[in-house]
Amino acid sequence: MSEHSANPSATAATGRSRAVKAVIPAAGLATRFLPATKAVPKELLPVVDRPVLQYIVEEATQAGLNDVLLITGRGKTAMVDHFDRRPDLEERLANKPELLAAVRRTEDLAEIYTCRQPEQLGLGHAVGYAESHVGDQPFAVLLGDEFVKPSEPLLPAMLELQARTGGVVLAFFEVDPGETARYGIASVEPAEPEFNDIAEVVKVTGMVEKPKPEDAPSNLAVLGRYVLPGRIFDAIKRTKPGSGGEIQLTDAMELLRTEGVPVHAIVYRGTRYDTGMPLGYLQTVVQIAVEREDFGAEFRKWLTDFVNNGDETVTSAILDGVRDASGGPNT
């Protein structure tokens, strides 16, 4: 747990429930990765030897969210299979204890539940399908194409903040002003002083989905982590289609804000991996590979040699990619 870990006494003093369930919307078609994702869900694309989805579930369980609901779609049953038992495989691995432990780890990570979203009509629409599983309790939403570095956790502070406020809690990261049209962007003001012990907290005064740079209220973009109160489901039902003709979660949260529900956010300064597009996916693979204890040093040496001996254009692109993925120069 991070230095901004939960304060149990403060949580208990509020008398509010603390989120214990996580929802992962993962029903999208992943058209940016076609034809690879025609048969293989994007969430199962490997980052070295673990699929993206496993990193996300591990992030949830690290924060104490052991009840995980996957919102799935057609052709995505393999996501559930990844976390299921494989007695035949385990029997074959009986004499390979390290591999056997890795396989069994996926079975023991969390209680995995699923719900089918029959058609993809936006993130808000997807989250709405979690109502029967979550009820009126607070819960976390983790998008299925990004995750944070385990040693730099984000969710514990978000869960604590939501338990204290009872409202909506988001996570922000800073983007280049020219990239605002890719994200939900917020306008903010300083948060109440009593939250200074949790993390870098701001109070959200407005949100807009994918604004043009000239219309963006800030450069704080919504990271794919949310902790929401149960009343978000009613707001989703009352939300009309917005950007792209879809029911946007951003619009539902903004509706709650205008009705008096407190909305806060934590500005995340740690390492964020974005696998939603091919370039970000490749950057993530390289970033994590060079940090592996078993072969990271050897891979880093090969990568350095490749960069030093390659075409200048290729060299520049690789170095820029590693810097972008790590949030700073590669060392």
Image (cartoon, rainbow, N blue to C red):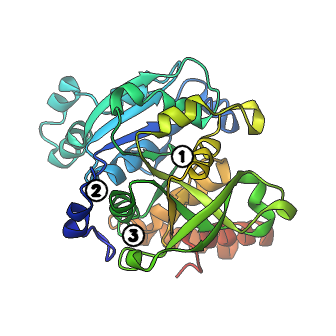
Give the residue drawn at x 56%, y 64%.
172
Where does label 2 land, which residue?
62
Q: Earlier in the sequence, mark 2 or mark 1?
A: 2
Q: Earlier in the sequence, mark 1 or mark 3?
A: 1
Q: Amino acid at mark 1?
A: Asp
Q: Is 131 positioned to the left or the right of 10 in the image? A: right
Tell me the element at label 1: loop
Q: Earlier in the sequence, mark 2 or mark 3?
A: 2
Where does label 1 land, which residue?
145
Which quadrant of the figure contains the N terminus?
A: bottom left
The vertical placement of 66 against 266, above or below, is above
Out of 105 and 205, give the one closest to the viewer.
205
Tell me the element at label 3: loop
Q: Position of residue 296 (x, y in %)?
A: 41, 67
Q: Is 292 positioned to the left or the right of 318 in the image? A: left
Alpha carbons under labels 2 and 3: distance apart = 11 Å
Query: Are there few (<14), some (14-19), or many (20+) residues within 10 Å of tag 2?
Result: some
Where does label 3 land, which residue?
152
